[in-house]
Image (cartoon, rainbow, N blue to C red):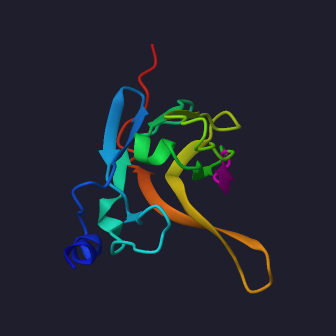
């Protein structure tokens, strides 16, 4: 009876954090949404858990995930601004839980582009929708936005 109460809270003690690192700074963020492995019981969404990190144009973003994420399939979904100011979306391939990949480096596809927001999404389960197609359920989401407080120092 106590377990459902803990899952409903915004800060379950065993919720894993994801670390984002860019240009000499890092931030560890708790999940914005987190579910148990089969994604049947989920905590309340916590949009305030999203972190901020200066992510200057031209620098990669490194992401480090704990075992709870690496042991399941996961991916990185991101939005960025092109050099001309156009808002674009992208995503990594899916990292297989079998490989237990704990790190990923995100490098934008064009020079001068700047990250806006990055999400790590851990898959919880696969279900079949009403039309018989496979549907992948996200069982955890970690978000970091670009604080834009820092520009790279050029030498």
Q: What is the residue that sits farthest to the top in this orientation?
A: 155
Q: Is residue 126 left or right of residue 69?
A: right
In this view, 85 is above or below 4: above
Q: What's the residue at 31%, 55% (across, down)? A: 15
| Nearer-the-camera pick, 89 or 104 | 104
Q: Is residue 86 magenta?
A: yes
Query: Residue at the location (56% across, 43% down)?
Result: 114
User: For the image shown, how many numbered marks are present on the structure?
Assistant: 0
Q: What percent of the width, then of the height, locates residue 87?
A: 64, 57
Is 10 located above or below residue 29 in the figure? below
Residue found farthest to the front: 1
Query: What is the magenta range?
Result: 84-92
- Residue at 70% in and 37% down: 110
Q: Foreground: 52 or 19?
A: 19
Queried whether the magenta region covers residue 27, the answer comes back as no
Residue pushed farthest bottom?
A: 130
Question: In this orientation, does residue 2 appear?
Answer: yes
**Where's residue 148, x and y in %?**
40, 45
Q: Quadrant of the C terminus?
A: top left
At a point 62% along the width and 41% down the height, the residue shown is 113
């Amino acid at each position: 009876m106590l377990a459902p109460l803990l899952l409903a809270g915004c800060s379950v003690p065993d919720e894993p954090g994801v670390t984002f690192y860019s240009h000499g700074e890092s931030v560890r963020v708790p999940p914005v949404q987190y579910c148990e492995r089969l994604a049947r019981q989920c905590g309340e969404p916590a949009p305030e858990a999203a972190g901020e990190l200066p992510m200057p144009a031209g620098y990669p973003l490194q992401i480090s995930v704990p075992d709870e994420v690496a042991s399941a399939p996961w991916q990185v979904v991101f939005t960025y601004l092109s050099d001309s100011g156009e808002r674009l979306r992208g995503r990594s391939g899916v990292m297989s839980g079998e490989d237990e990949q704990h790190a990923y480096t995100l490098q934008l596809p064009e020079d001068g582009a700047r990250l806006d927001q990055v999400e790590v999404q851990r898959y919880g389960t696969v279900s079949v929708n009403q039309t018989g197609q496979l549907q992948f359920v996200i069982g955890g989401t970690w978000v970091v936005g670009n604080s834009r407080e820092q520009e790279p120092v050029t030498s």
